[in-house]
Amino acid sequence: MFDVSCIPEFQQVASKSPYYLRRLERYMDQPVSEDIKIFHSSYYRLPKNKKIKTVTTVHDFTYEHFEIGARRVVHTFQKRRAILNSDVVICISENTKNDLYEFIPEARGKDVRVIYNGVSPNYRILNCVDEPSTAFVLFVGARSGYKNFSCLVASLEHLPQYSLVCVGGGAFKQQELAQLDALIPGRYKHESYLTNEQLNQLYNQAFCLVYPSLYEGFGIPALEAMRAGCPVVAAAFSSLPEICADAAILLAEVLPETIKGAIESLEDKSLRESYILKGLKNSSRFSWEKNAQEIIGIYKELCGEARE
């Protein structure tokens, strides 16, 4: 991670309030010291002092795509207000920028920049890895709705040579357990909390990462897997083609049979090796160092220093 100590007078402001009050604070302007020159929020807050230059980072439009009712209305109000009152808006992908213009057309008049997220150097190919007793497919992150987890489970029903390892996303729900036990009984495992080192070990051991999500603002797990030499099967939607480029098997249709076919295709050693090499090259495009330097460049502009 980039060392922010190199930024003069950098302060990270964190709320000390109880959780329920922090939820309310999201919708209120934030008090900051009068000597602060720039206020940068990644969760759609604004400073009370309107003279302070403001930067807002926009990650995605998940609420706008998938939520309904009051949750969407409140979240979108907060997001729109922050974006339209910011001096610079940072989007983490071109896809997020396109969504910004779709859902908040007035933002076309703002200074909008695309600055990609990075990927941790903790993810890498290990020289010595214990072979798993059974080849497994890896799934990382949340599993609800548009993440298409149920399609992955269904795809493995007729691939008895593979088990499924899920990382994060909370404990399996009863509906998920019912499907898992019906289709791949005894062939699944859930890991709740892993260190970066433990997750890297899984990436190194996995036959592949399947990332069938229909919507992502960026897609960090795909890049983590690529850095670790793990082939990736992903949906060809939202930001994933932009981030994965030609280094993943991209599915135009996310169905059990298309996921199954993609996994089986990686049994070809030469094809598998080509995706590993492409993944290593592609993931090298992204780093937190580069991300930080581009953001610092914006800070310098806002402080009156010349743009390079």
Image (cartoon, rainbow, N blue to C red):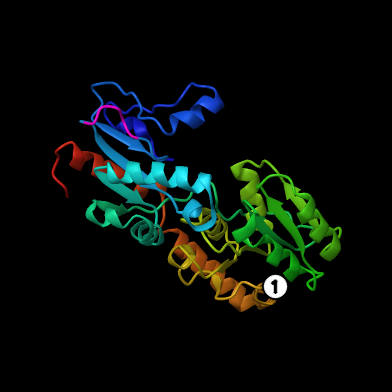
Pick the residue in front: 21 or 165.
21
Rendering quarter of residue 37: top left
> Does residue 300 belong to the magenta stretch?
no
- Indicate the position of residue 204 as horizontal and vertical percent values: 64, 56
Rendered location of residue 306, percent (x, y): 13, 44
Q: Nearer the viewer, residue 63 or 274?
A: 63
Query: Considering only vertical position in the picture, is 49 above or below 128?
Result: above
Splitting the image into 4 quarters, where does residue 53 fall?
top left
Q: Nearer the viewer, residue 133 or 4?
A: 4
Q: Which residues are magenta?
A: 46-50
Q: Which residue is under mark 1?
A: 256
Residue 120 visible here: no
Q: Is residue 253 left or right of residue 159?
A: left
Q: Is residue 80 above or below residue 102?
A: above
Is residue 116 found left or right of 193 in the rendered image?
A: left
Location of residue 259 with respect to 221 vertically, above or below: below
Residue drawn at x 46%, y 42% is 74
Vertical relation: 104 (above or below) 282: above
Front residue of 8/175: it is: 175
Magenta-colored stretch includes residue 47 = yes
Which kind of residue does numbered mark 1 sit on? Pro
Judged from the image, the secondary structure of the residue bearing numbered disc 1 is helix
The x, y position of residue 245, in whole percent, is: 45, 69
